[in-house]
Amino acid sequence: MKNPRCIVISGIDGSGKTTLAYWLVKYLRSKGYRAKYVWIKSKHTFAYLISQILEPLGWQRTFRNPNGIIISRFELYDSRFARKAWPTIEFLSVLPLIIFKIKLPLLLGYRIVLDRYMIDTITSIALSTKNMKFADSFLGRLLLKMMPKGCASILLDIDLSTVLERRPDIEYSYDEIRNAIGLYRTLTRKMKSVSLDTGTLTVEQTKKRVLELLFVTELMSKVPIERAIILDFSIVIPTVNRAMKLKALLESILGQEFLPKEITIMDQSDNRLTFNIVNEMKQSFLDRKILLRYFHINQKSSSKARNMGIDHSTAEIVFFIDDDAILSTDYTKNILKVYENFSDAVGVQGIILNPEPSWNPTSTASRLENQLKKAFFLSHYQENTWTIMPSINDAFPFPLTTVASTQRMQGCCSFRRKLLDIFRYDENLEGWSFLEDFDLSYRIYKSNIGSLYVTPEAKIIHKEHIHMSYSLKNESYKKIVNRTYMFFKLIKQTPRNGAIFCWSILGFLLTTTLGTILGRKKEKNRWIPIYLIEAAFYSLKHLKEIRQLNLSFLSNVQQRTLKS
C-alpha cells in the first residue's frame, strides 16, 4: 500500500516501536502532512482502573524475570470467571480509544502512526489470560477486524536474547517472552503484515526499509517478510569415530556453490583421528574464508553436541549435517532459495538419498508393504505430503516433486538461528539420540511460529551405517523406549491416540519379525525382533518414569560399543 493514512507499528518490548513511530511522525510532518502519534497499550482505560483497584487486594505477582530482576505486576486471579471476563473488559475499554484516537482523527484528515494496536492488544490479553488461542476466539477475531481500512501494519521482530538485552527489566517470564514472540509472528502472518528483523537491522537500515515499503514501493501485503540479500549460514556437524567419512563430507562442502560462514565440528570420538583430519583441512577452508572450528566433548550425545554447536553458531541460518553425508554441489544454494522464496520458512531440509536403495517403491511387493505399514500407522510414503501420526510415525513424501510444507524434519536440516534460542534438542535423549530431530522439528511445527519446508532440489546422500556403532540390543531398546517417550511428550493423550500408538507398536514388532523370517534382514540382525519384544516389556516396566519424561533408567541397558 502506497502512502497509507494509518501506520501500525507492533512488536514486543525492546523491538524499537516507539523510536520508529516518533520518527515516522516527524518524517510525515516534514513532508507537509498533518501527522498524529497514538499510543495504545493494554491495559486500556476502564481495564487499567480495575487493575489498579485489584492489585493492592492481592491480584498481583512478584517474581524474578530471566535477568534476575524482581518484578511485581498485576495478574488475574486464578479463576475461570476472571480469565473469561477479562477479555470482555479489555474489549469494552479499547472501544473509546478506537473512536476518539483513531477514527475521529482520520475523519479530520490526520495521518495516524500507531505505537502498538490490535496485534499487541491481543498478545497482551492472551498472556494475561494464559490463553494463547485467544486470537481464534470471537472477541479475538473481532479485535483483528478493527484495523482501519487502508492501514499498513509492520512488525518489528527480535529474538529472545535481544529482548533480554534491550529490556533487562521486562515484566515477563522466559516462557511468556517466548510465547509472545511466537504469537506476534503468527498474527503478523494472519494479518499479511510486513515483518522487519530489528535484531539484525540498524536503526537507519530499518528507517530506510520502512520508507521503501510505505512511500516508495507498494507494501508487500502478500509477502510477510522481505529479504533482499543472500542469507549467511553456519554448519554444525556432530561426529563420533568416523574421521574418513567426515573428511568426505567436508570435501563436499568445499564444492558447494554457496559456501558457509563457519563450520563447527562437535567431536565425540575416542581417538584423535577426527582432530587430525580437521587440522589437515583447516587451511583449505581458511583459503575460502570459512572458519572451521573443532570442539571435543566427552559425553556421547548427539542432542548435546547439536545444542553446543548452536551456541557456537553466529549466522542467520544453521545447517545440521550428519558426518556420514555427502552434499550435492547445489545443496546449500537450493536450501537458501526456499528461505528466500517462502518468507514464513523457519526450517528447511532437502531430500535424503541412500546410495544403494534397498527397495523399489514402484514394485508390487513395495506397494503392498506400504499399505500394510499404513494400516498399522507405521512410516509409509505418499505424494508431496509429510505428516505426523499419533503413533510417532510419519507419512513421508514420495515422490516429492515440489517444495512442500512438512510437520517434521530429519537429522540433515536447517533452521533460522533466532528460533534456536527458543527451541533446543532434548538432552534427555542420551547417546544415539533417536528421534531428537523429530522432537525438535515437531515442537517447532506445533508452535505456529513459522513453517517447515522440504525441497526436492537439495539432495544429500546419507550412507547407511550402524548408529554410533551401537550394539543392536541397545539400538532396539531406544527405538521402542524413545518412541514411547515422544508419545507422552508430544501427542495429546486421548483413548484414540493411545490405541493408535499401541497398535503401531504391535505392527512394528510384527512387520520386523516378518521381514526377518523372509530373509530380508542381514544375518547378524536376526536377533532384532527378540530385542524389540524385550524393549516393549522393558518400556511397560518403566512406563511411570517414561510418562514423567524421565529416561535415566536407560543407563541400565547394555552400553553402546563404540568402534574406531
Image (cartoon, rainbow, N blue to C red):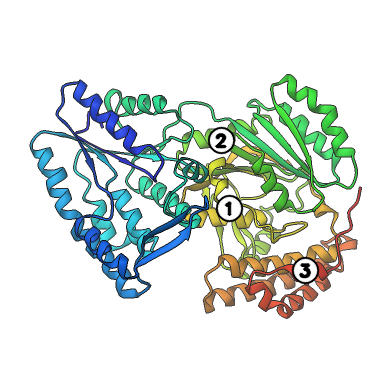
Task: Pick the quarter of the image with the N terminus.
Answer: top left
Residue type (three-letter) at the residue carrying disc 3:
Leu
Discs 1, 2 touching: Cβ within 8 Å? no
Q: Position of residue 33 (x, y in %)?
A: 16, 26
Check disc 2 and report the residue beneath it: 316
Classify 10 Å Cα crowding around label 2: few (below 14), some (14-19), many (20 and above). some
Report the amino acid beneath label 2. Answer: Glu
The type of residue carrying mark 1 is: Ser
Q: Which mark is residue 38?
A: none
Residue 441, labelled with which disc?
1
Indicate whether 380 appears above or below 100: below
Q: Nearer the viewer, mark 1 or mark 2?
A: 2
Residue holding disc 3: 554
Give residue 71's position: percent from left, percent from top.
Answer: 43, 56
Residues under labels 2 and 3: Cα distance? Answer: 36 Å
Counting from the top left corner in percent of width and height, residue 58 is at 35, 70
Can the viewer see residue 327 in this picture?
Answer: no
How far is disc 1 from disc 3 in space, using C-alphas? 24 Å
Of callouts 1 and 2, the N-terminal one? 2
Q: Secondary structure at mark 3?
A: helix
Q: Earlier in the sequence, mark 1 or mark 3?
A: 1
Q: Residue at x 78, y 46 (%)?
A: 356
Please indicate, yes or no, whether residue 528 appears anywhere in the rendered image: yes
